[in-house]
Amino acid sequence: MRALFVGLGSIGTRHLKNLTALCKEKNIPLEAYALRSSARELPAETAALLAGQFTELPQGEKWDLAFITNPTHLHALSLGQLAGRVDSFFIEKPIFEATGYDLEALGLDQGQKAYVAAPMRWCGAFLALKDQMARLRPYSARVICSSYLPDWRPNVDYRQVYSAHRDMGGGVTIDLIHEWDYLVDLFGAPLESYNFKGTYSELEIDSDDLSVYIARYPTLLVEVHLDYFGRSYRRSIELFCKDGTVTADFGAGTVTLEDGRVIDCAEPVNRRYEREMEYFVNYSLQGTGESINPPAQALQVLKLTLGEM
């Protein structure tokens, strides 16, 4: 299996390590390559996992897998350059920084295998919540993701990363697209939604650091709060139902049921990415049709996130 990583920042490196471990476990021969924007030396442990590195895309090369893990505003360019040369794409979220891209022109039509990252769908607490959904009829849902951007990447100046810059596809509205992704997975798209966003804190960024939504479904209302400035990490969904509240706390790894019983789903954060990689490799090798999060769906979620639908 030949895999190309377009960008090897923190998330690209995580995927490279997980792919390497999975292929070793399943006895799948792997040659991994990296297309990089600079010649900066990689950490030795990362470089050791690669069969080669490029700063320009080799002509005529084809790949079984390609991981689009560079900054969001470069995704479309990378996909266009690789169109017709990759069997299966793994595209890091969000798919693009804006919604005006033509998927067919980028080679992402129905004949192209492609999956857009949705790691929250693979975490233990979310999987446990989904197991409960068939018996629940929530009247309303309240979602929050609150965290402190400078703590996201230890030893990295938060002001220099894409999250801090609107023109690089940053901003809490699309950076935390996970929340709308899993809401659409649970309930589908809302009938209508309203969004207020802006930059309100003292963080030295030009992207939005707060985004708040209210959305209407046929049988429930949903509130969503996203921010970059919460000093205590909070990531959860509360479902208000007839017999009480069901809460999935993704930080604690728990699901609390109406009667107070707690399902313990605590696990290392990387486990969700491992499950995601297992799915993607299986889909790439054996799957048919669209992935569980194809580009067209991811683009619709992006439109929803940006208030364009």
Image (tube, helix red, strand yellow):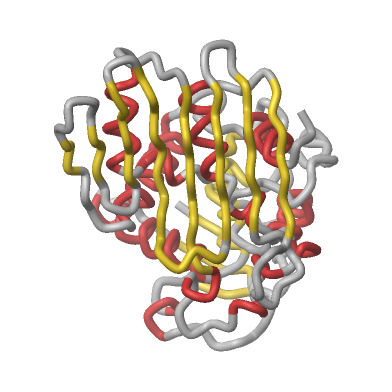
Residue pushed farthest bottom? 41
Instruction: Give the residue displayed 39% in from the left and 34% down from the top.
Output: 238
Report the front residue among 32 and 309: 309
Q: Quadrant of residue 264?
A: top left
Q: Position of residue 241 (x, y in %)?
A: 36, 19
Q: How many marks?
A: 0
Report the front residue among 85 and 227: 227
| In this view, 152 is above or below 42 | above
Q: Quadrant of residue 57?
A: bottom right
Residue pushed farthest left? 261
Report the front residue among 220 and 303: 220
Q: Position of residue 187 (x, y in %)?
A: 50, 21
Q: Please indicate whether residue 270 sits to the left or right of residue 74 in the image.
A: left
Instruction: Give the residue displayed 63% in from the left and 48% down from the top.
Output: 94
Q: Please indicate whether residue 96 sits to the left or right of residue 8 in the image.
A: right
Q: Please indicate whether residue 283 sits to the left or right of residue 24 in the image.
A: right
| In this view, 190 is above or below 248 | above
Q: Quadrant of the C terminus?
A: top right
